[in-house]
């Protein structure tokens, strides 16, 4: 088990703003990073996604939990996306957003609700994933992290942010 400290925006915005580097999906270090991310996310029961830069590692690996939005609202175990690249995005709408790097802060962001992503899974196999609805929001949020883009950048107005 390797539970890492999650970088908070208020403590270290630079780490969260830095662009991440592609990884060798078949290298054991990628599998190790996936494991560390899963251990860390597992320590945050309300988390539904995590990106490597949030534990201070600037490599292009993220986790997403599907099924967190309606109709299910019961997030499934995290799946890893290695070197994810968005190849199709559409159906932009406002939806709820939040981030483990911003505890207590939430917002209504504008993101695609249809998303096609290509990359590698945690076994190093090339994959293409299609996400609809809130699953697309979660995947888009996590891929954003790899570019140093944060959910506060995706609100139309500061009035769309709220504390809870
Ligand atoms: Ni986040």
Image (spheres, rainbow, N blue to C red):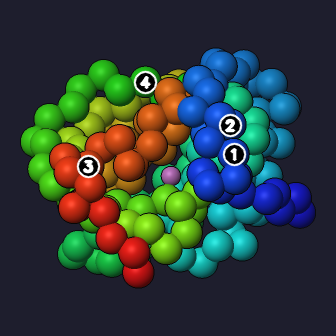
Gap in angstroms between the C-alphas marked 2 and 4: 21 Å
Of discs 1 and 4, which sits in the foreground?
1
Q: Is residue 16 left or right of residue 139?
A: right
Q: Residue at x 80, y 25 (%)?
A: 27
Query: Residue placed at 35% from the left, 26% from the top?
Result: 86
Q: Residue furthest right?
A: 1
The image quadrant that residue 21 belongs to is top right
Tell whether label 1 touches label 3 (CB within 8 Å).
Answer: no
Mark 3: give few (<14), some (14-19) or many (20+) Cα within 10 Å.
some
Q: CA distance from mark 2 to mark 3?
A: 21 Å
The residue tagged 3 is 155
The residue that disc 2 covers is 15
The quadrant of the image that shows the N terminus is bottom right
- What residue would you read off at disc 1? 12
Left or right, 66 with reference to 15: left
Front-lying residue, 14 or 22: 14
Q: Secondary structure at mark 1?
A: loop
Badges 2 and 1: C-beta atoms under 8 Å apart? yes
> Percent from the top left, x then y, of residue 148?
52, 32
Whether residue 33 is visible: yes
Residue 67 seen by the camera: no
In the rendered image, which residue does mark 4 sit on? 85
How many circles with numbers are drawn on the protein? Answer: 4
| Residue occupying image coordinates x 83% and y 42% | 32
């Amino acid at each position: 088990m390797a539970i890492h400290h999650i970088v908070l925006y208020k403590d270290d915005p630079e780490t969260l703003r830095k662009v991440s580097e592609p990884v060798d999906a078949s290298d054991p270090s990628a599998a190790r990073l996936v494991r560390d991310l899963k251990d860390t996310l597992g320590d945050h029961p309300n988390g539904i996604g995590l990106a490597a830069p949030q534990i201070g590692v600037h490599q292009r690996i993220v986790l997403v939990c599907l099924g967190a939005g309606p109709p299910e609202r019961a997030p499934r175990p995290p799946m890893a996306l290695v070197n994810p690249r968005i190849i199709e995005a559409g159906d932009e709408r406002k939806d709820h957003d939040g981030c483990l790097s911003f505890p207590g802060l939430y917002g209504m962001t504008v993101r695609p609700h249809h998303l096609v992503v290509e990359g590698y899974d945690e076994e190093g196999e090339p994959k293409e994933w299609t996400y609809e609805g809130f699953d697309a929001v979660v995947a888009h949020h996590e891929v954003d992290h790899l570019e140093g883009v944060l959910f506060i950048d995706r609100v139309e107005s500061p009035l769309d942010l709220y504390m809870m």
